[in-house]
Amino acid sequence: MYLQFLKKDFLRNRIIYFMAVPVVAYYAIFHYFPMYGAVIAFKEFNIAKSIWDSPWVGFEHFKVFLNSYYFWRLLRNTLLLNVFQLLWGFPAPIVLALLLNEIRLKWFKGIIQTVAYLPHFISVVVVCGMVVDFTSRSGIITDLVVWLGGSRTALLSDAGNFRTIFISSGIWQEIGWGSIIYLAALSGINPDLYEAATVEGAGRFKQMQFVTLPGIMPVVVILLILKIGHMMDVGFEKVILLYNPNTYETADVISSFVYRSGLTGGEYSYSSAIGLFQSLINFILLIAANGLARRTSENSLW
């Protein structure tokens, strides 16, 4: 019965199924098929042998990582960077979208949007180069710090400054691009709700509080769940472009450690085990966040 229904549905919507083939093939070839390589996390991988011919070691690499000197430092730095990004970086596009929604001059709104979107299209390498130059001893940000009463020093050489610089530069680069989805959600709110609120005497702030925010809340909840599902992820590209041995204490994260261990140190099995551990924690956080959202609101991923 089910096969007959599937056959009829395929014949009725065969064009749509054919359009989905490239997408399915992409994820199958580049995302799911390579997952078989994760088995080297449980082996002592020898590059001269195949993955399957390398000897099994079980959970040995996981034990070594969990008992290593670097484990707690990496876990702390990874979580703190993501928590700060969640606290400051996640609300920033929402605030920008709400502010843009209140602008009535279309030409001015267009200018602000264009200026806010542009940093997203700048390469991470270029952005990091700009950050390094601006925070050097003679950089413009350092000059501002000195003008405010601080001392002249290379800001990125101080471990205490890394998180602030990392988070603030990320907000600057992504705030405009991240606001697009919220602006789309705002455009879907029924204008009659604003008219009704106006009739009831609600000002623009009250309208934002009782109409706008509830209208975009489903989108906010979904994106928040997805963000929590990546709490153990920090893009290693930006980290390795900004950090140095002086800032390892606050800048070294799991992703950068995997990069150094795997590509630089050649410890493929060890780095794969760390990456698998990181993905497992992300999966658990995603399930927990979705369950909490489902219990406390009507919005969830599933």
Image (spheres, helix red, strand yellow):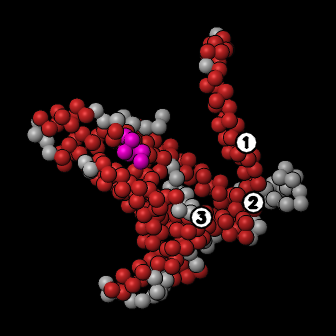
Q: Which residue is mark 2?
A: 269
Prevalent SS, magenta region: helix
Q: Position of residue 124 (x, y in %)?
A: 56, 64
Badge number at residue 236: 3
Of the 4 image quadrants, the one containing the N terminus is top right
- Range shown magenta: 180-185
Q: Which mark is residue 29?
A: 1
Amino acid of disc 3: Phe
Q: Is residue 182 magenta?
A: yes
Q: Nearer the viewer, residue 253 or 178?
A: 178
- At x 65% / y 57%, what residue is drawn? 275
Q: Compared to 24, does 50 lie above or below?
A: below
The local crowd at label 2, few if under 14, some if 14 to 19, many if 20 or more residues have their Cα within 10 Å, is many
Q: Taking 29 as reference, is 269 above or below it?
A: below
Instruction: State the image coordinates of residue 41 (x, y, percent, origin top left).
Output: 73, 55
Q: Residue flagged by tag 2: what amino acid is it?
A: Ser
In the image: residue 80, left or right of residue 183 = right
Upstream in sequence: badge 3 or badge 2: 3
